[in-house]
Image: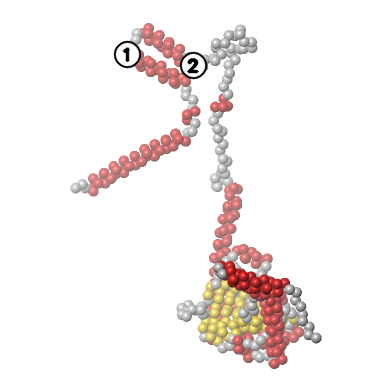
Amino acid sequence: MSSPVDRSHWLTIFALTLLFVSYNIANAGINHLDIEDNEFAEFEDFDVEDVVGGVASDQKNVVHDHEEPSTADQDKEAAIADEDEATVETEDNEFEHVDEDEYEGYEKDSTSKPDLKLNEGPKITFAQLPAHLRSNWESYYLELMILAGLVLYFFNFFLGRSKNQRIAETWYSAFKGPLLEKFALVGDDGKLENSQPGLMKESENVYLLWCSGRTGCEAVLFELRLLKRQDLVAMVMNVFRPQQDQVHVKVFMNDSDMDTFVMCLAAKKTATRFVREMADISVYCPEKKSAVDKFGLPANFVLMSEIGEASSTLLDSRVCSLINNIPEVIESIHFSDQYSGPKQTEDTAPSKMPEVKKMLIFNFNLPLKNGKSIVEAVEIIRPAIMLTFYCIDRVKRFRLSKEFKTKAEKNRQKVEEAFLKSTHAARAEAAAARREEKRRLEKEKILQDDDPEKQRKWEEKENKRLAKKRMPKMKAIKV
């Protein structure tokens, strides 16, 4: 049994052997590559003198092998060798046999020279590569700008996302207590077992909070629509078109807890957008009226109301006082029993009346600008959030008088009739298409039947129908 020292000795020898073999293989591969890379090796010229000298030396070696010549012979052979070395082989002139006197203008010394350009190899051109990055920064300006832009975008993404998350968490911690007092369930996610009640993250700038378990309404959705701080492009656009962080509150009312009316109090720009985009406002109350004289609100607000009694009752002194205290927070207050969302385009016009819901919608601005901290902005918006609960109770108790109730019902009946009239042509077209399809299927069924009597009867029936259709319509007058 060999000792550990012997084994280490043999391992060392084996490693050195492997190293030596691998070095020789690598060296042979490099030489082989050099030979293969040299494409013009076969065109290289050899030195004539080396060839002639090599032949002479071979001849001398042969003579020495047979016999040793004498001194005179050696001198003679040396002279011959010198002559051989000095002699340069030239090609025979192809015009040697020509007689000089036989041809005029022939010169013996004038020999045709071969065209050397034909033997030239292909011209090699080297691509002009840019210098190294350390010595030529100008060639990489575009790449450096793209890299810097990516770094800036990702840095802004993580910074903006963290700030939006801080705003949402601060808002939730500030209103969690009051919401738990007003609702039985705060932070419902629609599942039977809600393991983690609280804010639901819809996207990097949208957070949702569902609350339910209160009389007068089915549920309330708090939606935090913050600026897209994680998007660098959106932040650049925000410089040219400023926007604000907003809190949208949507109250889903019970059918029996809200009367039939539509009204909206909003800022001028928002009101113009609502008239253009919202289906219920554009149909029931498109006219914008000033809210300064009657309600004493700031000039920036306009009122759109279907029933004057509803706006006069719901916009009481408490609501108007709160709006005057924080006008920069209130963006819009929208009450509607015919809420169906934005208007549908003409291309996607429905064939039946859209489904409507009774809802109260509040849009509040979160004033984070002008150097205000997140906590200060949340405290400023607190009275507006409390206003939603007050309006829920007011709408639940409010009922229209008989006169205005009849007016509201007539308005809804007119809207339904206008909708049916506008869709009558589309419905008639659809009915004609269905009838045509029914006749086509009936014709195919008759043609597949082998009974000629049935086919004849069907053709007679079809001809009578077409003849009746072509006859002019006449009105019968009784005398």
Quadrant of the frame with the C terminus: bottom right
Tag 1 residue = 66
Q: CA distance from mark 2 to mark 1?
A: 29 Å
Q: Residue at x 56, y 58 (%)?
A: 150
The residue type indicated by label 2 comes to Glu
User: Secondary structure beneath disc 1?
Assistant: helix
What is the x, y in percent for residue 410?
Answer: 71, 86
| x and y percentages locating residue 369 in the rendered image | 64, 72
Residues at marks 2 and 1 touching, judged by CB atoms closer than 8 Å: no
So how many labels did they put on this image?
Answer: 2
Q: Residue furthest left?
A: 1
- In the image, residue 236 above or below residue 382: above
Provide residue 41's location: percent of width, then percent of height: 47, 30
Q: Would residue 465 be seen by someone viewing this image from the given angle?
A: yes
Residue 433 image label: none
Where is residue 186 drawn, in percent x and y? 52, 82
Q: Amino acid at mark 1?
A: His
How packed mark 2 is, by other alpha carbons closer than 10 Å (few <14, some 14-19, many 20 or more), is few
- Horizontal side, residue 376 vs residue 281: left or right: left
Q: Residue at x 78, y 85 (%)?
A: 478
Is label 2 in a helix, a strand or a loop?
loop
Q: Residue at x 34, y 42 (%)?
A: 19
Residue picked out by circle 2: 89
Q: Is residue 301 visible?
A: no
N-terminal-most mark, 2 or 1: 1
Please identify the quarter of the rendering in which residue 358 is found. bottom right
